[in-house]
Image (cartoon, helix red, strand yellow):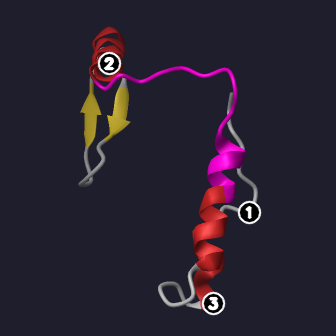
Amino acid sequence: MIVHTDKGNSLVTLPIMQYDYKITVFIRANNFKTTERNPTKTFQFQVRKVVTDSKTLIPQEIKWQYVNMNPHSTN
C-alpha cells in the first residue's frame, strides 16, 4: 500500500497486512465503539448551530465556509 503522509510532501509504502494491524491496534487502544445509526446529521446540526449562534467569533460573511452544505456518509 502506498499512501501520502499527513504532513510533508512524501509517500509511505506499507504492506497491507501491517497497515490493517496498525489500524486494529489504534482502534482497540482508543476504545472506539460501533453504532448502528449514522450520527452525521446530528453532528452537522450541532456545528451549524454553533456557527450560526456565534455573534463575535465568526464574521457573518464567512460563516458559510464552516458548514458542509450536503453532508453524507459513505456507509
Question: Mark 2 sits on what residue?
Answer: 19
Q: Is residue 69 above or below residue 16?
A: below
Q: Which mark is residue 69?
A: 1
Point out the image quarter for the C terminus. top right
Choose between 42 and 21: the one closer to the eye: 42
Residue at far right of view: 70
Residue 48 placement (x, y as % from top left): 66, 66
Q: Dot 2: few (<14), some (14–19), or many (≥20) neighbours within 10 Å?
A: few
* Amino acid type indicated by mark 2: Tyr
Look at 31% across and 26% down and name the residue there: 30
Instruction: Report helix, strand or loop for mark 2.
Output: helix
Q: Is residue 67 something one can see in this rendering?
A: no
Part of the protein shown in magenta = 30-45
Q: Dot 3: few (<14), some (14–19), or many (≥20) neighbours within 10 Å?
A: few
Residue 72 position by quadrant: top right
Residue 17 position by quadrant: top left
Foreground: disc 1 or disc 2: 1
Question: Mark 3 sits on what residue?
Answer: 60
Residue 35 placement (x, y as % from top left): 60, 22
**What is the CA distance from the residue labelled 1 to the residue labelled 3?**
16 Å
Name which of mark 1 and mark 3 comes first in the sequence. Answer: 3
Q: Is residue 37 above or below residue 64?
A: above
**What is the CA distance from the residue labelled 1 to the residue labelled 2?**
33 Å
